[in-house]
Image (cartoon, grey):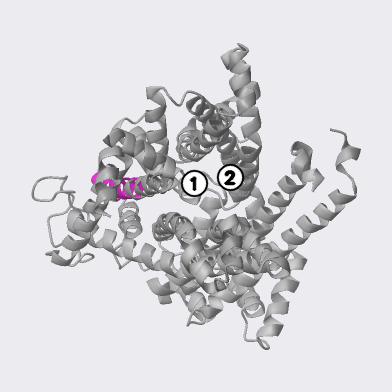
Amino acid sequence: MRKAFSGLWKTSGYFRFGIVSISFAVLMFVLSFFSPYKPMESFVVPANLPPSLAHLFGTTSRGQDLFWQMTVALRNSLLFGAVTAALSRVIAIWVGMYAGYRGGLIDKAMMAVNDSFIILPVLPILLLVQFLVREKMNWFYMASMLALLGWPYDARLIRAQVLSLKERIFSETAVFCGMPTGRIIIKEHLPYVMPIIFATTINNFLWSIGLEVTLSILGLTNINNASIGVVIFWANQHQALISGTWWWLAAPVGITVFVFAGLYLLAVALNEYIDPRTRLSMKAVAA
Amino acid sequence: MSIRGVLGKSFFKYLAQRVGQCVLVVFIGITLTFLLPRLAPTNPIEMKIDQMMTGPMRVYPEAVASFRQAMYDLYGLKGGLGEQYIATWARFFRGDLGPSLTTYPRPVSHLIWRAMPWTIGLLLTTAILSWLAGNLLGGLAGYHSDKRWTKWVELTANCIRPIPYYIFAFVLLIVFCFLVPIFPSSDAYDRGVKEGLNLRFMVSVLYHTFLPALSLVITGVGGWLLGMRALVSNIVSEDYVQYAEFAGVRKGTILGKYVMRNALLPQLTGLGMGLGTIFSGALITEYVFGIPGIGLISYRAIVSFDYSLIMGISMFSIVGVSVSVLIVDLLYPFFAPRVRLQ
């Protein structure tokens, strides 16, 4: 594990950037517990101050310190993404594995439903639901709803991998040797499926945070609960750009870019690492 | 390829399969819009009516009456769940989305039709532009994968790819409307210009939609670029490409005719699938730049509690997406001979 880490650190710029960005996110996450202000409480600091040493990201027109507000906002958004990704993994892994191993008519039927979910426009459906239950919307209900809509593409990727694994010679060998099916799946196949699960988890995580931001910008989430999108919502409400408080938008936008790019590059680096050809070239660099 | 070659027996099987898929999408979509709000622990009808009456928008009493009627039809307490479900479908098949609540009695479908050209124009153009740019750059980067600049191109694409589209809209807005104010930040054309097929109008539209279009193109390029690069770097090592190189075929010809052409099919499929998302649009982009498309009317519907408009937009998007995917699917055998053989 440590060897893998130092190897990746030495050879992959993506990995280094990813680690730096995740460290930043973790730091913000931890700091959020020490915030001197309640995140959404207004007029606790002077309003409309540009970024300075006293207020790293400046202050809002509502008299909030953007830095401390962003620590909590980032924490909430990350938690939301993590819960959505975890919930949708349950569906994606189950559908992908089950359809892949069962095959036949069940597989066909499941994939028809799966493809329908891929085609289905998520945003208009979410808009409708959020619109109707806006006041009663809590983040867990919203996370479950996103999970319910966000699994199909990943399930397809997992199924494809299972299908190809089933055809490999080592699977046949294992069957002929009398290995029980459960053991084949867990011991022999899971190591090949895990990288895909991992990569799709990160993508799903980013996707769900992205959608949460979209809905928040429109004011369709609980706008008194800090998240990246809610900060942007309030900046728009106060016409931050017209009144010249550009930092109010720049802070959430900059942090989103930094953290999203970091997480994605980390996933790319790890995927490359999983590919044995990359590891060989890493050995060549180290030698 | 001749039409008759395509329209064999297997094509009709394929056709039936695709149409079936399309119907299934619509079925699942409408069912979800019916079920999901019911899973929430609230009865939205009277709550919404209260909000409308106390809200900032002027609401017509006739509108409220027909709204209550529509709501009780769709969500109503008339009959059991099954009966309500059937009522929803009945309304769907009649194409009866009801009148808009805030612009009563103008029907919802009228508002959607008027917004459609803006959204389709903006998204279709940017989807095609970013597809072209991404594939061209990706092809070059994949073919010259040993050069230094390709590393930078790849890094940039990888950084852009995960960023949500609206982030670029905000960045461009901050930079080109406020820090260096050279582009307009709202409306799709100048207020004084008359809508129609005249030069001034078109120039004005281009000027106003340049930034939103640019933000969408930037968002789209990364994915296509990386996809094309991966495809091309696989094809480059194929025997026939090596052979062409040994035979001294011009580099440009190899890249264009031997390599990229073979990589185009999966990318074309991707474009077809991507076109489906046009209806859900780039909501935030339209909202931020004030382009009067589906996204902006969705936003207006949300802030003015126009339930029937929201419902109309989501039903319309579900049908629009599934039909456009169906069309792409049906065109596919004409481009991809292998599909025909199945």
* Magenta extent: A245-261
Q: Amino acid at mark 2?
A: Thr
Q: Amino acid at mark 1?
A: Glu
Pick out the residue farthest to the left: A54
Q: Residues within 10 Å of mark 1 (few under 14, many from 20)?
A: many
| Residue at 11%, 45% in the rendered image | A52
| Residue A35 in picture, x, y percent from top left | 14, 64
Q: Is residue A158 left or right of residue B107?
A: left
Q: Chain of mark 1?
A: B
**The N terminus of chain B: image quadrant:** top right
Q: Is residue B96 left or right of residue B228?
A: right
- The quarter holding residue A86 reads bottom left
Q: Is residue A182 left or right of residue A79?
A: right
State the SS at label 2. helix
Question: Which residue is labeled 1 in the image?
Answer: B286
| Residue at 61%, 79% in the rendered image | B75
| Residue A20 in picture, x, y percent from top left | 23, 47
Question: Which residue is labeled 2 in the image?
Answer: B119
Is residue A246 on the magenta stretch? yes
Callout 2–callout 1 Cβ contact below 8 Å: yes
Q: Chain of mark 2?
A: B
| Residue at 23%, 65% in the rendered image | A40
